Amino acid sequence: MFIIKKANAISIRLLRRSFILQEPVLSKMGTSFSRSYSPNSGRCSDSTERRGTISRVDSTTEYVESIVCNENDIKENEMKIVDIGEDGKVLLVKQKGEINALGTKCTHYGAPLTSGALGDGRIRCPWHGACFNIKTGDIEDFPGFDSLPCYQVTVTEKGQVKVKAKLSDLKSNKRIKDMGSVSPCDGSVIVIVGGGPSGATCAETLRSEGFKGRITIIAKENYLPYDRIKVSKIGTVTDIEKLQVRTQEYYQDANIEILKGVEATNVDSEERLVYLNDGSKVRYSALYLATGCKPRVPEISGINLKNIFTVRNFEDSMNILRTLGSEKDKDVVVLGLSFIGLEIAASCCAKAKSMTAVGKDTGPLAQVFGQDIGRSLQKLFEEKDVKFHFGTTIVKCNGENGAIKSVELDNGTTLNADILILGVGSTFHTDFLKDSGIKLESNGAVSVNDKLETNIKNVYAGGDIAYAPVYAHGNKHMCIGHIGLSQYHGRVAALNILKKETPLKTVPYFWTMLFGKSIRYAGCGKSSNIQIEGDINELKFVIFFFDESDKVIAVASCMRDPIVSQFAEFLYQGKTLHKKDLKDDPFAWTKSIVQ
């Protein structure tokens, strides 16, 4: 029976057909984390039918229920934001005649999902490509850790759409999956080597999918898993707690053990042991390797001077910012014209006396997007007082009192440099696997199948180090380093560890933000030619990349969302696009994502 709260606490607005309800909890269950299950949204009467949200809470839960629209107000394959009384907003999605109600924003960075790409049973975020199931709200592709809240929908005999939602879900717009329970009788142990997003996602998926044994994460850094993508974009010194994706309490409640500040030194695959640098060892039933990459440091004279930094982790970012200070009295040189180098230059230039980017390329990101785009990006950076030296590299670092003071380029130029930041690629963090029996490629990558399993049974690898098949590239094996894919690997590995056979269906998705300009890219492969739609000078464009057969293998955009997310969903559905298909209307294909 519902208990209506007193009018002096929360008013009941019958004219708006909404009311606040307080529902008693039938039993007290464990943690305060909640999981909402998708209700069926068939037609029903106005009376007492109750479906849907199942809560796990420690006290009573407040709900709001409201008629939000008429059934005919929302069209097939339409996404529409509606008010639920005066308490919040929900996203309605109508597909295959069924109406579902979800949170309105991506749980990663808050992108409005109504502007995203609606596929078959899921929505893809317009900014970074995360995907959410429209029936359950569960996150199915990444980046991000939280799912969307999913609300109860009923359609009355009069065709009125009624939505019931938890007030707390409306406020947070996020839902943490139920982590289940641990059984002391289950002696199985899953060890995850790597405390980054891939390892963290694997651990969470194992628990949410019902694994009751022990989970141990071996983390080289002294921190809980955090949002590593922000490392090259942090403009001010901050606390690690603001970047961590979960609290210590969360991992304790989920019975996920994290060994911080230690790293693996060897794996004995016959005895199923991982040896650690503190002298201890951990036995496993199944092993997931997600150790990522380490920044490449070029062999340059003077490279070991002080105030020369790489950009990989939180400490790197904080050390750069502390050395840079706030007096704008440091000359900074960045080596590298790819995403990392440009992101660092963009985020730090306002704090520097001077900022200069150096690289072998002919323009910023010109290798990826072509010379014309490179020139427009160069203009954008130069307007912010960032200088460039193209077609060259650093051959010597000169110091004073043990700290860098200048760099010499191979063209004879000398640049003042109080700080040098290296953004010239990375190598795989897999040296500890050389004698393990696990198959490594010549570059150190770990070879895996479409279930992310290595040549050793019950040993899996994912993230940057995985030489894995890529669905969007004809299932050819590749190594791709990006947070969204690393999290996806973590999820797929967990499902396969639990014998819930799930083959990879990888669609690479990249993004960056440079001086307020959002650049996105989906797909992969070497292109033979391109087609540009839009205004390059205004940095508002779409690029189609073609292979030798004129097949579109990738799409990039700047300030033209959600086109890249639409193409990612297009590839995920196994569809193909060719140059001839773009002739009359370059964007007609977007209509085929949902039918």
Image (tube, rainbow, N blue to C red):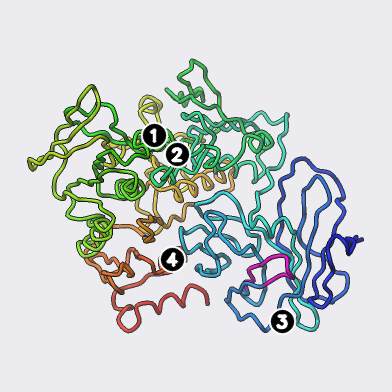
For disc 2, the marked residue is: 237
For disc 1, the marked residue is: 322
The reply to whether the C-beta atoms of the residues labelled 3 and 1 are less than 8 Å apart is no
Asked if residue 427 lies left or right of residue 173, the reply is left
Given this view, does label 3 or label 1 mark the residue nearer the observer? 1
Given this view, does label 4 or label 2 mark the residue nearer the observer? 2
**What is the x, y in percent for residue 385?**
25, 53
* Label 2 environment density (alpha carbons within 10 Å; few <14, some 14–19, many ≥20): few
User: Distance between the Cα atoms at labels 3 and 2?
Assistant: 50 Å
Name the residue nearer the viewer: 171 or 456: 171
Can the viewer see residue 522 in this picture?
Answer: no
Asked if residue 130 lies left or right of residue 333, the reply is right
User: Distance between the Cα atoms at labels 4 and 2?
Assistant: 44 Å
Using the rendered view, name the quadrant where residue 497 is placed.
top right
Q: Secondary structure at mark 4?
A: loop
User: Distance between the Cα atoms at labels 4 and 3?
Assistant: 35 Å
Q: Residue at x 14, y 45 (%)?
A: 392
Any magenta on residue 560?
Answer: no
**What is the x, y in percent for residue 129?**
47, 59
Q: Amino acid at mark 4?
A: Gly
Can the viewer see residue 116 in this picture?
Answer: yes
